[in-house]
Amino acid sequence: MKRAAKDNVERIFQQSYISHKAGRFFEAEKGYRKLLSIKPKWGQPMSALGILYLDQNRPDKAKPLFEKAAGLNPPDLSACYQLGRLKQMENDHQGAIPVYRQMLEQQPEAGLVWNNLGVAYRETGNADEAMDSFRAAVRFAPDMAEAWNNLGVALDEQGQVEQALNAYQKAIKIQPDYVSPHLNIGIILQKFERFKEAETHYRKVLESQPKNEIAQFMLQSISGGDSPPDAAPVNHVRSIFDQCAEDFEAILVGELEYKTPERLFHLVRPYLTEKMEILDLGCGTGLGAVLYRPFAKKLTGVDVSEKMLEKAAEKKIYSRLEVFDIMQPWAFPVKFDLIYSSDVFVYFGDLDQIIKSAVTCLAPGGKIAFSVEKLKDDATDYQLYPSGRYAHSRNYVQTCLNRHGLEPLALESADIRKQSGDPVEGFLVVAQKQ
């Protein structure tokens, strides 16, 4: 290309870029398209036009441009980055990984790209690769608070609590009002019963986000009080189980000697027959599902955590699995002969709505079986503990069952899990729709 022609295309690009930044999208698009008519394989205006479409909330038009620019030789690195981000926005984290890898071959010290790659690996369940990526991110971008927070989460998920706290603290040092690390630190400190320190971090969260439901809930769990919230925030519960999905069974069964699914099954076993429609409410990874499978015509599993459902799907036990929020309206295509739920109701104080919804989905004579933590004071319906879980009184559970036409078949005390090495007492309940 002659010097004058090269100067002309550079001038058109600069003018188009200025128009783009000024919000004059029509002028900018016209300029970018003119450049591509002159140089069809010029990645810079191709990528810029894709970004313009993103700015107009038109990702369907942006994506083909990023794919084309990323496929050039050499690839346009801006297009690679935008394509990776777009894939992640579409929840295609697996598809984003090779795009970021391609970019890092050209820019191996791009901390921001390492951070995004770490997120993609974490979302696809590759914890080791995620950890390595976040470590690279903080090495090449040590002033990136988000990368330190993500490294903290990765360390936290692998049980490296002290290292996680250190990473979170570094994120806060860089960005003192950064909500996520404050919340993460608060939750860790609360687990170690360092309540005053945890409260300080929750209040920092609420300074920036006064309506943050998780911080409000955790504060209430520490302070107690006569008017606890009706339930844990759904995003909090989802986050808990999304983070622990990979090691959930090893920790719960191996370390905490969790046997509630088996104990609940043995209690409900005398009432089971063949070819039942069964709902596993809050199924998690499917602990105990194999016990119910021989009695099921169809076994449906629902959970608020998509990552837990992915683990449940690997067992190939369920007829159907779906993401489900218990507090939303229930709409199932069949009536169930049995609804069972292990260690789920502990995230809800007011059980009235859940029991009511369950009854509407039970066939005549259908049964519900569930576990709750035991509140010894029958003068109180339920109480929120610093663990972030609820305990319920026997009187309250019986009242809920009676109110909705359920006849108790069994209501027994049992150790339902361990906390800090000590058994936690609860109730196992089986009731029948009259």
Image (cartoon, rainbow, N blue to C red):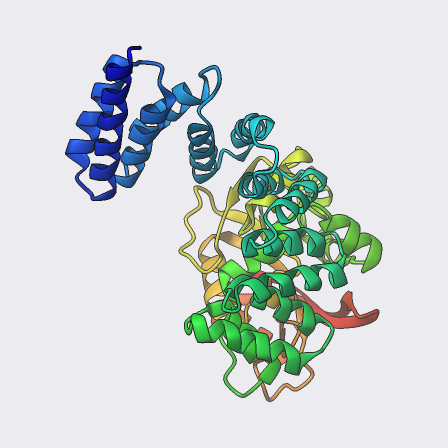
The reply to whether residue 90 is visible in this rendering is yes
Quadrant into which the N terminus falls? top left
In the rendered structure, the answer to whether residue 18 lies left or right of residue 223 reads left
Say above or below: 65 vs 245: above
Say above or below: 161 vs 38: below
Image x and y of residue 274, in percent = 65, 40
Residue 421: quadrant of the picture: bottom right
In the rendered structure, the answer to whether residue 111 lies left or right of residue 272 reads left
Say above or below: 154 vs 378: above
- From this viewpoint, which residue is outermost toward the top? 1
The residue sitting at 28% across, 11% down in the picture is 2
Say above or below: 368 vs 188: above
The reply to whether residue 300 is visible in this rendering is no
In the rendered structure, the answer to whether residue 305 lies left or right of residue 64 reads right
Using the image as rendered, state which of residue 184 and residue 382 is in the foreground.
184
Image x and y of residue 16, in percent = 22, 32
Image x and y of residue 361, in percent = 47, 52
Residue 257: quadrant of the picture: bottom right
The residue sitting at 28% across, 40% down in the picture is 55
The residue sitting at 59% across, 84% down in the picture is 224
Using the image as rendered, state which of residue 367 and residue 172 is in the foreground.
172
Image x and y of residue 214, in percent = 51, 68
Using the image as rendered, state which of residue 324 and residue 388 is in the foreground.
388
